């Protein structure tokens, strides 16, 4: 369609009449900002599980049919001399085709700085982002947002799309990726918003700034170290009819490129509803293909999610932490054992921890295990420990339990979980009884064993020497017995 260059002072009048491009409008466009309007149509997806017949369009429905919704925004490329800039155009319409409008700064003309009369290089990208970029002589680079809260704006599939026109006219978007559609089902009626975090265990990104290349055009997602910012994405959406929907674009048609870890939270309480870790990698969907995946997330969740499937709220072998002044950093400790492992669970007052970005490690701690009859030393409880584990609660000011003396049976040499919520830090540590240093845990029949934990104010600046600090928390209370627990007969792996 044709567009209108309208000075801001004439917008009200222009709303009542159509206009055509003219020399007068071009001149006034140089004097002040103006409104640019363009029509856009988006493509449908190929839904891998779609039924044979499609119903009325509404977003990307179960059949892959698409429609715009009011509030959707696109980025369109303009230039002022050699300066290229994407401007945001939004729509108030809904449907398969919609008109998008936005205010353009004075001096900017539609298309790229290296455009020509025969090819203006008019690029349009969806969803809109201030971080999309264009360099003359190249295709744009597309910014895939790492975090989007749809409850603060409006829901959108947000799958990367583009169009590239040689001259002004209606846009017809094309897909730049394949995608997964995560349908979260069986959501409790008390949960209003769900937050999904997803990270890729493979070395391909899920978010970040990536070039558009190839024929057909696609996003060239590149290397991203697992656990890095670009390997992750966080999306928040409202719950409707006990389910929520999320679309996650990804590197398309690349063998074994997608092996996600998906965690679902109640976005209002922060409680974990479910966690799913893919055991093997999958080939991502082809360009323009969406692969639906259903995940059940019943219940109201927990502030802590056990990697070993333990419902710590129902475990009854526990002790409160010391409540005396300056010794009360630990709130609670629980213990559980099976024929192969000993599991220790801790709740720590986050406000009692040292928080300083200059500290490489902070809050040195000690985990003690004892048989109650032998051992080398313990000045804090009545029992002597058979073994202890020295570690740090924080690393570079983030929760990351780091073991100093490795190789003594802590699974992975770190806890399966450590994280904070509402002023409490939760930790879970698993200890492998089969370790050669743990013969006192390899009894043939059930016996009693003991566990204890304390935290100090010691820290390191960077990776340098350690300050000694003082003890800031005990569990159990200082001067009494360690926490006793029943240890089942050991079964060798």
Image (cartoon, helix red, strand yellow):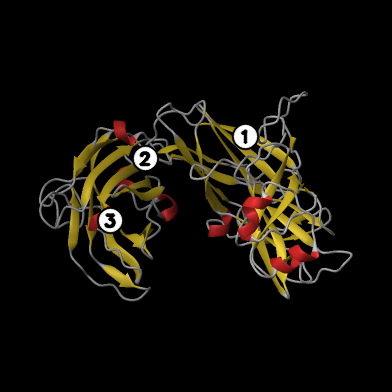
Residue assigned mark 2: 269
The location of residue 465, given as percent across then percent down, is: 31, 76
Q: Residues within 10 Å of mark 3 (few under 14, many from 20)?
A: some
The image quarter in which residue 223 lies? bottom right
Badge 1 element: strand
The location of residue 364, given as percent across then percent down, is: 28, 62
Tell me the mark number nearer the camera, choosing from 3 and 1: 1
Alpha carbon of mark 2 to alpha carbon of mark 3: how far? Answer: 35 Å
> In this rendering, would 108 be left or right of 295?
right
Q: Reading the chain from its start, which is encountered first: label 2 or label 1?
A: 2
Alpha carbon of mark 2 to alpha carbon of mark 1: how far? Answer: 25 Å
User: Which dot marks residue 190?
Assistant: none
Q: Nearer the viewer, residue 332 or 150?
A: 150
Q: Reading the chain from its start, which is encountered first: label 2 or label 3?
A: 2
Tell me the mark number nearer the camera, choosing from 2 and 1: 2
**Above or below 324: residue 279:** above
Tell me the mark number nearer the camera, choosing from 2 and 3: 2
| Residue displayed at 64% across by 57% down | 10
């Amino acid at each position: 369609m044709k567009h209108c260059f309208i000075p801001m002072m004439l917008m009200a009048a222009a709303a009542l009449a159509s206009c055509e491009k003219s020399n007068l409008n071009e001149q006034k466009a140089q004097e002040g900002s103006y409104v640019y309007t363009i029509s856009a149509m988006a493509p449908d997806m190929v839904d891998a599980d779609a039924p044979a017949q499609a119903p009325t369009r509404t977003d990307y429905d179960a059949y892959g049919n698409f429609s715009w919704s009011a509030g959707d925004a696109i980025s369109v490329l303009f230039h002022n001399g050699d300066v290229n800039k994407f401007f945001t155009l939004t729509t108030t319409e809904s449907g398969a085709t919609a008109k998008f409008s936005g205010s353009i700064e004075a001096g900017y003309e539609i298309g790229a700085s290296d455009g020509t009369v025969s090819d203006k290089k008019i690029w349009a990208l969806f969803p809109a982002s201030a971080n999309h970029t264009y360099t003359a002589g190249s295709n744009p680079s597309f910014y895939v947002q790492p975090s989007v809260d749809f409850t603060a704006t409006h829901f959108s599939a947000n799958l990367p799309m583009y169009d590239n026109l040689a001259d002004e006219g209606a846009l017809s978007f094309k897909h730049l990726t394949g995608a997964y559609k995560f349908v979260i089902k069986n959501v409790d009626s008390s949960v209003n918003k769900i937050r999904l975090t997803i990270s890729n265990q493979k070395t391909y990104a899920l978010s970040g700034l990536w070039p558009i290349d190839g024929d057909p055009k696609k996003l060239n997602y590149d290397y991203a170290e697992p656990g890095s910012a670009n390997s992750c994405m966080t999306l928040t959406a409202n719950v409707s009819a006990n389910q929520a929907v999320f679309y996650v674009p990804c590197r398309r048609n690349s063998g074994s490129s997608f092996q996600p870890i998906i965690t679902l939270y109640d976005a209002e309480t922060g409680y974990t509803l479910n966690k799913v870790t893919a055991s093997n990698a999958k080939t991502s969907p082809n360009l323009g293909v969406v692969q639906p995946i259903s995940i059940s997330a019943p219940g109201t969740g927990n502030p802590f999610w056990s990697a070993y499937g333990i419902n710590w709220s129902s475990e009854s072998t526990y002790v409160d932490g010391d409540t005396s002044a300056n010794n009360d950093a630990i709130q609670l400790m629980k213990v559980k054992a099976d024929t192969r492992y000993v599991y220790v669970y801790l709740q720590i007052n986050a406000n009692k921890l040292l928080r300083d970005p200059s500290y490489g490690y902070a809050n040195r701690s000690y985990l003690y295990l004892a048989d109650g009859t032998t051992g080398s030393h313990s000045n804090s409880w009545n029992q002597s420990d058979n073994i202890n584990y020295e570690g740090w609660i924080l690393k570079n000011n983030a929760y990351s339990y780091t073991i100093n003396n490795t190789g003594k049976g802590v699974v992975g040499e770190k806890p399966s979980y450590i994280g904070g919520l509402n002023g409490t830090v939760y930790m879970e540590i698993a200890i492998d009884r089969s370790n050669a240093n743990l013969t006192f845990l390899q009894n043939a029949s059930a016996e009693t064993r003991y566990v204890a934990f304390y935290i100090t104010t010691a820290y390191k600046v960077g990776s340098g020497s350690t300050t000694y600090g003082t003890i800031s928390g005990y569990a159990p209370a200082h001067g009494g017995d360690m926490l006793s627990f029943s240890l089942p007969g050991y079964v060798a792996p």
